[in-house]
Image (cartoon, rainbow, N blue to C red):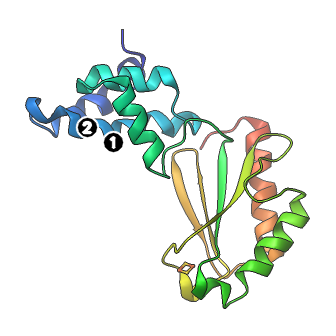
Amino acid sequence: MNALLERYPDEVKAILARYPQEQKRSAVMPLLYLAQRERGVITVKDMAEIGELTGMEITEVGSIVGFYTLYHDSGPRFRVQVCTDLPCALRGADEFLKRLCENIGVRVGEPTADGSLVIEEVTCLAGCHHAPMFQVQGDGEITYHEDQTVESATETIAELRRRAAGGQHE
Ligand code: FES
C-alpha cells in the first residue's frame, strides 16, 4: 500500500483528479508539497510513492526535489529565511542577519544544536519595503515576518524552538 495515499486518501485523490490520466505527472508538485507538509522533509520513500502515483521514475521525482528551493530532502523542521537582497540590504538586512545569528549562536546555513531550525540567507521575498524581513518555512506553511528587529526575530525563533521541542505540529 502506498503510505502517502493511506495517510491522506482524500487529498491525494483530489490532487490526482485535477489532471487527466495521461498527464498525471503534473500532480508531482502538489504531491511533493503534501508529503513535505507533515515532517518538513521529503524522504526517499515519499519520492518512490509519488513516482508510483504519477508514473514517474524515482530519479525524476528526486531531480524535482533537488531543483526547487521550496522542497527539502533533509534538514531541520523550520527554515528561517532572511532576505539580504539589495533593497533589504539598504535597510540593514546584513547587520540584522549577523546579529540574529550571534544571538542564536549559529552560522548562516548551519542547523541549531537541537536540530530544530536553520537560518538561511535568501533573495527577494517581495517584502522589500518592510525590511528587515524573513519567512519561516515549516509545518506545512510559510509565514512572513516584516519590519523586524533582532529582538523580535530572536523571540520568534525561541517560539519555533519551543514548538519543535514539544513536538507540537500546528
Ligand atoms: S529585496 Fe528583500 S524582500 Fe525584496
Residue shown at 72% from the left, 51% from the top: 118
State the image coordinates of residue 80 (x, y, percent, origin top left): 67, 59
Residue shown at 25% from the left, 37% from the top: 27
Please tell me whether residue 32 is drawn above or below residue 68 in the rendered image: above
State the image coordinates of residue 6 (x, y, percent, origin top left): 38, 17
Q: From the image, tell me which residue sits under label 1.
A: 30
Identified by mark 1, the residue type is Pro
Residue shown at 77% from the left, 37% from the top: 166
**How busy is the neighbourhood of tag 1: few (under 14 within 10 Å), some, or many (20 plus)?**
some
State the image coordinates of residue 90 (x, y, percent, origin top left): 66, 91
* Separation of residues labelled 2 and 1 (CA atoms): 6 Å
Judge from the rendering whether residue 36 lies leftward or rightward of residue 117; answer left or right. left
Please tell me whether residue 143 is drawn above or below residue 99 in the rendered image: above
Can residue 33 be seen here? The reply is no
- Number of the label disc, if any, that sits on residue 27: 2
Name the image quarter holding the C terminus. top right
Q: Nearer the viewer, residue 163 or 66?
A: 66
Q: Nearer the viewer, residue 63 or 115?
A: 63
Please tell me whether residue 64 is drawn above or below residue 83 in the rendered image: above
- Residue farthest toward the top in the current orientation of the protein: 1
Residue 151 appears in which quarter of the rendering?
bottom right
Q: Secondary structure at mark 1?
A: helix
Judge from the rendering whether residue 21 lies leftward or rightward of residue 28; answer left or right. left
Identified by mark 2, the residue type is Ala
